[in-house]
Image: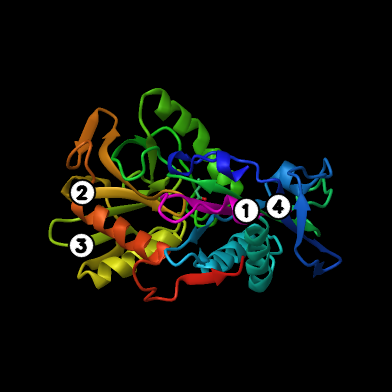
C-alpha cells in the first residue's frame, strides 16, 4: 500500500492506516494500550463526550530522520499538555508513560506509513481522550477511552511555507476569558468552524481571533498561535489566558533567542500589528505559516511579498525542521527516539 502514497504531495487529509491504539479507564484503572485493527468505535449513545463535549486531543509529530531512525518530537511535553486539557475538562488523563507507550506502539504498527526522509512529510499522531460513561445529568464521566491514531501528512495550509491571507473574526469569539481557550478541548475547534467557513468563502485562508472581552488584543488563530517579528529583532507572541500553550511556539522562542532575538510574551494590541515586519501562525500541524495580509473590517495590512516568506520566519522554519529531521543537533532534548 505504501508504494501508492505520493509522499511529496501530501496535504493535511485523513488517511486510513488500518489500525489505531486504544486504552480504557475503568474501575479507577487504565488498561494497557492495545493495537486495534480498523477505525470504528462502539460507544454508548449517552456518553459524556457526545452530549457534553468531554473530549480533548493532542497533535504530535513523528519523523524519519536523516540517519534513518524514527523519532517523536517533544512527546513528554505533549503528554503534559494533554493532562492539563483533561484536568480542565474534569477528565482522567492517561499517565505520561502510557501516552508515550501508546504513541510508540502506533508508530511500530504503522512503520510503512512514516514518510521517508527528504520528502518533507511527517507522520501526524492524534491522541484523543473521550468520556464514555452514559450520564444524562451534567457530570463528569467515570470511564474514559484513550485513542491514538496516526497518518502521514504534508503541510496544513497548502504549499507549506507560502504566505496566506488572514481575516480577523469580529462576529464570533473563540474562547471566553476564563474559559477553555488555553486547553485543547475538542469544542474549541467546533467554535471556530463557522467563522473559518465564512472566511474561506471570502477567499481567506486563516482566521484570527482577538480577546473576546474587548477585541483589543490578539489571541490566536483557529488552528495555531500568533507570532510577530519586528525589524529590531524582537519575537513577539501574545500572553493571554485564552491561548493554547503551543509546543511549536515554545520551540521557536528558544530557537529565536539563540539567534539573538529578544523574546516578548505579552499582550499584543491589534493597533501595533502594522509595526511587525513579518507575522505568522505556528503549531504542530502548521509548523509556521507566514501571513501576507490580515484584514479587519475594511482595513487590510500587508506584510512583505505575497509569494515569498519573510527571512526571519524562513530561517526559524528551516531551523526547527533541521532539528526535527536530525540535520542539526538536538540542543534542547526535544527528540524522543522510537524503535520501529
Ligand atoms: C495541531 O497543530 O496539531 C493541531 O492540533 C491543530 C489542528 C487544528 C490541526
Of callouts 3 and 4, the N-terminal one:
4
Residue range highlighted in magenta:
110-130
- Residue wearing tag 2: 310
Instruction: Inspect this view and state whether residue 180 appears.
Output: no
Q: Which residue is mark 3?
A: 234
Question: Residue 111's quadrant in the figure?
Answer: bottom right
Disc 3 and disc 4: Cα gap in Å? 42 Å
Say whether disc 4 or disc 1 marks the residue closer to the N-terminus.
Answer: 4
Residue density around tag 1, few if under 14, some if 14–19, many if 20 or more, within 10 Å: many
Residue beneath the point at 36% across and 76% down: 331
Contact? badges 3 and 1 (CB < 8 Å)? no
SS for tag 4?
strand
Q: CA distance from mark 4 to mark 2?
A: 39 Å
Element carrying mark 1 = strand
Determine the residue positioned at 68% across, 60% down: 90
Q: Nearer the viewer, residue 170 or 189?
A: 189
Residue 264 appears in the picture as rendered? yes
Q: Earlier in the sequence, mark 4 or mark 2?
A: 4
Residue 169 location, x and y as percent? 39, 36
Q: Quadrant of the C terminus?
A: bottom right
Mark 3 and mark 1: Cα distance apart in space:
33 Å
Disc 4 versus disc 1: nearer the observer? 4
Q: Nearer the viewer, mark 3 or mark 4?
A: 4
Q: Nearer the viewer, mark 2 or mark 3?
A: 2
Residue 56, labelled with which disc? 1
C-alpha separation, residue under disc 2 versus residue under disc 1? 34 Å
Q: How far across and how far down the image is residue 159, in percent?
A: 36, 39
Residue at the disc numbered 4: 20
Q: Is residue 257 magenta?
A: no
Query: Residue at 41% of width from left, 28% of height from top?
Result: 200
Amino acid at each position: 500500500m505504501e508504494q501508492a502514497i505520493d509522499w511529496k504531495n501530501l496535504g493535511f487529509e485523513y488517511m486510513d492506516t488500518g489500525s489505531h491504539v486504544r486504552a480504557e479507564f475503568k474501575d479507577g484503572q487504565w488498561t494497557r494500550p492495545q493495537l486495534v485493527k480498523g477505525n470504528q468505535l462502539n460507544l454508548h449513545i449517552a456518553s459524556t463526550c457526545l452530549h457534553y463535549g468531554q473530549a480533548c486531543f493532542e497533535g504530535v509529530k513523528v519523523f524519519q530522520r536523516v540517519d534513518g531512525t524514527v523519532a517523536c518530537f517533544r512527546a513528554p511535553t505533549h503528554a503534559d499538555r494533554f493532562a492539563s486539557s483533561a484536568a480542565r475538562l474534569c477528565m482522567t488523563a492517561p499517565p505520561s508513560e502510557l501516552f508515550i507507550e501508546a504513541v510508540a506502539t502506533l508508530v511500530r504498527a504503522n512503520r510503512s506509513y512514516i514518510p521517508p526522509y527528504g520528502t518533507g512529510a511527517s507522520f501526524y499522531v492524534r491522541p484523543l481522550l473521550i468520556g464514555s460513561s452514559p450520564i444524562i445529568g451534567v457530570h463528569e464521566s467515570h470511564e474514559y477511552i484513550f485513542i491514538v491514531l496516526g497518518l502521514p501528512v504534508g503541510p496544513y495550509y497548502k504549499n507549506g511555507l507560502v504566505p496566506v491571507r488572514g481575516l480577523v473574526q469580529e462576529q464570533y469569539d473563540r474562547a471566553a476569558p476564563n474559559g477553555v481557550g488555553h486547553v485543547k478541548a475538542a469544542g474549541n475547534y467546533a467554535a471556530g468552524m463557522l467563522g473559518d467557513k465564512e472566511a474561506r468563502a471570502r477567499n481567506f485562508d486563516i482566521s484570527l481571533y482577538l480577546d473576546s472581552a474587548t477585541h483589543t488584543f490578539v489571541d490566536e488563530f483557529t488552528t495555531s498561535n500568533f507570532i510577530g517579528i519586528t525589524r529590531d529583532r524582537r519575537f513577539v507572541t501574545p500572553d493571554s489566558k485564552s491561548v493554547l500553550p503551543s509546543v511549536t511556539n515554545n520551540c521557536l522562542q528558544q530557537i529565536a533567542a539563540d539567534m539573538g532575538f529578544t523574546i516578548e510574551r505579552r499582550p499584543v494590541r491589534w493597533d501595533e500589528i502594522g509595526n511587525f515586519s513579518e507575522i505568522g501562525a505556528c503549531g504542530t500541524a502548521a509548523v509556521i505559516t507566514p501571513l501576507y495580509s490580515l484584514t479587519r473590517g475594511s482595513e487590510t495590512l500587508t506584510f512583505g511579498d505575497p509569494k515569498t516568506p519573510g527571512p526571519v520566519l524562513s530561517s526559524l522554519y528551516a531551523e526547527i525542521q533541521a532539528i526535527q529531521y536530525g540535520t542539526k543537533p538536538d540542543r534542547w532534548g526535544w527528540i524522543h527516539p522510537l524503535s520501529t
